[in-house]
Image (cartoon, rainbow, N blue to C red):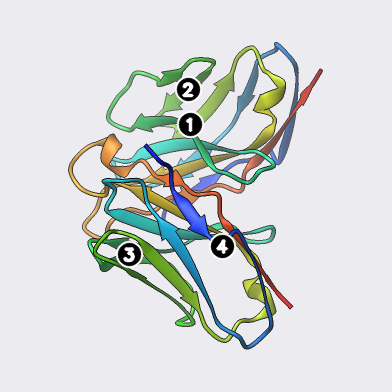
Amino acid sequence: AQTVTQSQPEMSVQEAETVTLSCTYDTSESDYYLFWYKQPPSRQMILVIRQEAYKQQNATENRFSVNFQKAAKSFSLKISDSQLGDAAMYFCAYSREGEYGNKLVFGAGTILRVKS
Amino acid sequence: KAGVTQTPRYLIKTRGQQVTLSCSPISGHRSVSWYQQTPGQGLQFLFEYFSETQRNKGNFPGRFSGRQFSNSRSEMNVSTLELGDSALYLCASSLGWGLGLSSYEQYFGPGTRLTVT
């Protein structure tokens, strides 16, 4: 079974600084998808960034970028120029296509605090 | 495009009762997945429906069931509620078919907070 591990329960960053959240996963598949979701105090899950495993180029969405290391099964999220609105719980998630549909396997999450 | 909607947003039920939660997906999305979020267990997959058929199921007891209608709206039912069923129930929709990432990106609703007393 696939597992996703986020080893940092909590992180802090100063406003305007850069922070990196770690995620590792375990799978025997070669084609899969990886996602980072943000869950602010409102509890609404927001899709931040996505990555296809067969694409070597790291995904980027504005201030958010990933460092995808397929061989190491690592998928870290970098947030540049951190803003107060970035404070939230961040979840790393794994999914893949299959005859049994798709489901997201989530890590335990990392709480990100942004200091002004 | 309107996002995923869930009703009700909050529910308080008593042990032994049953409850039905509703989810309306993004227009054009045919897959609806349900997740349970608790402080202890985190986010766990309950089941996925696609074109009115359950396509995937998580490791939950039979008290948890669901269905999907022809307009892709989905309902989730929990019978004989237990205290441990208190959780945030999240629904997510995706296209659910075809190849490529865009077919499988899941977009979440605001959730239903269920409290069992």
Image spot of residue A36 (x, y percent)? 50, 35
Q: Amino acid at mark 4?
A: Pro
Dot 1 or dot 2: first in sequence order is: 2
Name which residue lies at 18% across and 44% down. Answer: B98
Name which residue lies at 70% across and 30% down. Answer: A87
Label 4: element kind: loop
Residue for badge 4: B8
Q: Nearer the viewer, mark 1 or mark 4?
A: 4
Q: Amino acid at mark 1?
A: Phe
Dot 3 or dot 4: first in sequence order is: 4
Dot 1 and dot 2 residues touching (CB under 8 Å) = yes
Image spot of residue A92 (x, y percent)? 52, 40
Residue for badge 1: A75
Q: Amino acid at mark 2?
A: Asn
Label 2: element kind: strand
User: Does B16 sit above or below residue A67?
Assistant: below
Q: Quadrant of the N terminus of chain B?
A: top left
User: Does A61 sit above or below residue A112?
Assistant: above
Residue for badge 3: B56
Name which residue lies at 35% across and 60% down. Answer: B73
Residue for badge 2: A67
User: Does B70 sit above or below residue B100?
Assistant: below
Q: Nearer the viewer, mark 3 or mark 2?
A: 3
Q: Amino acid at mark 3?
A: Asn
Name which residue lies at 49% across and 15% down. Answer: A62
Image spot of residue A12 (x, y percent)? 76, 27
Label 1: element kind: strand
